[in-house]
Image (cartoon, rainbow, N blue to C red):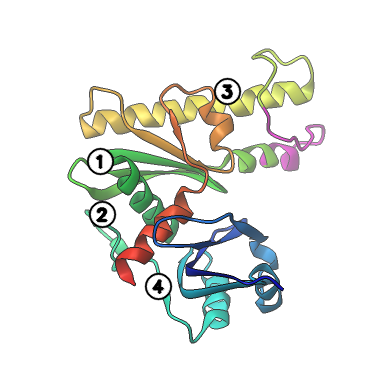
Amino acid sequence: MSITTADFLLIDNSNSFTKFALSSRARVGPPRRLRTADLDAASLKNALFGWRWQAAVLSSVVPAKGEVIGDYLSPAPVVRVGAKTKLGVGIDYPQPKTIGADRLANAAGAFARFGAPVVVVDFGTAVSFDIVSAAGNYVGGVIAPGLEAMTDYLHQRTALLPRISLIEPPGAIGKSTKHAMLAGAVYGYRGLVRQILREIAKELGIARKLPVVATGGYAELIAAGLPEMRRVVPELTLDGLRIIGTLNL
């Protein structure tokens, strides 16, 4: 059996999937993933087979599953990301403890890579916009329904609309039900993202191009049609966890 050893085990426990990666203090390795609904001690053992680490860094937005992960890793050192964790960015927010751990990891990762101000758009189960101000502080964000949630809702609530796989539509005028749904989803979602970014830039008082980085499952699809979104970093959350690990361990 081949054993891989690293400084950190990084864990991004989100609503749909949980991602795992080993990392050094400088670089994140290839991720593995597990459906969060299937996560238990047995599936964790399989997911982490062949890996060894010195300490773990955990971002969890699913409390019950986060406890399962914490119990599994015990008694090894675990950094649980939260507002009191060293992030490399400040927090200027009324109730810091209510900020999702994944959003803090994204802010840490984006700030370390691109400086400030910067906006992270994370295309997950929900799409979240997280803003780091020019002063280097997390100042808040926006949450909207995720792209899959919108299309699945149409399928679930209408008798004749199918469940679709999201790809670039062939054009704005659909020549089939599927293509019409794709146009509505992809073009409509780009419009939603563009308008939210405009309002954020206005509120920040940024006249020049707003620095934006996209991450998450549909980041490349949506960013392909948005000139405002030139940076796509698929594993930004994990890289943010690596940075948090270096600051806290």
- The residue where tag 2 is placed is 89
Would residue 50 be counted in the magenta stretch?
A: no
Q: Earlier in the sequence, mark 4 or mark 2?
A: 4
Residue 161 x/y as whole percent: 78, 32
Give the labeled residue for mark 4: 79
Please say if the residues under marks 1 and 3 sit with CB atoms less than 8 Å apart.
no
Task: Assess disc 2: are there few (<14), some (14-19) or many (≥20) residues with their C-alpha within 10 Å of its C-alpha.
Answer: many
- x%, y% of residue 193? 46, 31
- Quadrant of the drawing holding the C terminus: bottom left
Label 2 is placed on what type of residue? Answer: Val
The answer to which quarter of the image holds residue 165 is top right
Discs 1, 4 touching: Cβ within 8 Å: no
Local secondary structure at mark 4: strand
What segment carries the magenta color? Answer: 153-167
Residue drawn at x 51%, y 70% as measured from the top left: 63
Label 1 crowding class (10 Å Cα cut-off): few <14, some 14-19, many 20+?
A: some
Q: Which mark is residue 187?
A: 3
Q: Which type of secondary structure does the marked residue at label 1 adopt?
A: loop
Residue drawn at x 25%, y 54% as measured from the top left: 89
* Relative height, residue 243 to residue 129 (above, below): below
Residue found at x 40% / y 56%: 26
In the picture as drawn, the residue positioned furthest to the bottom comes out as: 75
The residue pinned by badge 1 equals 116
On screen, residue 207 above or below 86: above
Residue 51 placed where, x, y %?
Answer: 60, 71
